[in-house]
Image (cartoon, rainbow, N blue to C red):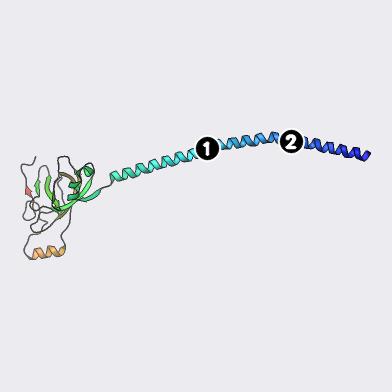
């Protein structure tokens, strides 16, 4: 009988111990849920921050690429520039063409050069309001001079150049022409072959 009572007491004690553990676990559970609830808003904030950074980075990249595109200097032939006036009107471009023979005019005071270039039948008037031009830029009879002018197409229809580049004749061609008695195309303007025609009435 004593053994039976002892077993009963042990069973009750174990039952009480188990009952004591249940509330403790129940109290721990909300704490765990609360931690989980804290982590969720934090995760949302991190995702939001990441999305914001990506959007900002994309905007900066688009701005940089857009600025680079606007700042780029395009090189186009004369006929393409004239065919797409609206597209190139506000841009700094390099236009390529061949100097129209006999069209090179200049004024000494203030310095200004005017000439025509052409490509595939399209002709463009060019104004270059500067004193210095390349030595290779000469209007020479029977010699084709390829010209690249950098600047902007003006609303008046002419091309306002800030820089002029001309293709230099080959040394072989120069020797051939010298052998035939032609003057060198590098003469000073106003002094023989290669000179532009002076304009006294330019405005």
Local secondary structure at mark 2: helix
Tell me the residue at 36%/43% (across/down).
62
Q: In this view, does 71 lie to the left or right of 56?
A: left
How busy is the neighbourhood of tag 1: few (under 14 within 10 Å), some, or many (20 plus)? Answer: few
Tell me the residue at 64%/37% (across/down).
32
Give percent across and percent down for residue 95: 19, 49
Tell which circle, 1 or 2, labels the residue nearer the N-terminal end. Answer: 2
Q: Nearer the viewer, residue 104 or 131?
A: 104
Give percent across and percent down for residue 197: 6, 49
Q: Read off the residue under disc 2.
A: 22
Give percent across and percent down for residue 11: 84, 38
Q: Which of 78 and 181 is in front in this view?
A: 78
Report which quarter residue 194 is drawn in: bottom left
Q: In this view, does 21 lie to the left or right of 159?
A: right
How busy is the neighbourhood of tag 2: few (under 14 within 10 Å), some, or many (20 plus)? Answer: few
Query: How many numbered discs?
Result: 2
Q: Read off the residue under disc 1.
A: 44
Relative vertical location of residue 165 with respect to residue 4 in this rendering, above or below: below
Report which quarter residue 112 is drawn in: top left
Tell me the residue at 77%/35% (across/down).
19
Note whether residue 25 is visible. yes
Report which quarter residue 37 is drawn in: top right
For the N terminus, give its image quadrant: top right
Q: Which residue lies furthest to the right in this view?
A: 1
Marks 1 and 2 sit apart, C-alpha to C-alpha, by 34 Å
Q: Is residue 5 left or right of residue 172?
A: right
């Amino acid at each position: 009988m004593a053994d039976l009572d002892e077993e009963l007491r042990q069973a009750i004690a174990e039952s009480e111990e188990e009952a004591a553990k249940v509330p403790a676990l129940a109290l721990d559970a909300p704490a765990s849920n609360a931690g989980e609830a804290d982590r969720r808003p934090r995760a949302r904030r991190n995702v939001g921050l990441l999305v914001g950074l990506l959007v900002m980075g994309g905007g900066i990249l688009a701005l940089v690429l857009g600025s680079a595109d606007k700042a780029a200097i395009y090189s186009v032939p004369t006929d393409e520039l004239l065919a797409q006036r609206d597209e190139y009107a506000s841009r700094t471009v390099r236009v390529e063409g061949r100097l129209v023979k006999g069209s090179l005019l200049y004024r000494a005071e203030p310095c200004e050069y005017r000439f025509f270039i052409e490509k595939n039948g399209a002709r463009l008037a060019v104004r270059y309001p500067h004193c210095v031009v390349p030595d290779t830029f000469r209007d020479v009879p029977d010699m084709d001079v390829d010209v690249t002018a950098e600047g902007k197409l003006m609303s008046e229809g002419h091309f306002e150049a800030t820089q002029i580049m001309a293709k230099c004749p080959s040394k072989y061609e120069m020797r051939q022409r010298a052998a035939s008695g032609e003057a060198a195309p590098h003469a000073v303007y106003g002094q023989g072959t290669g000179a532009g025609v002076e304009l006294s009435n330019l405005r």
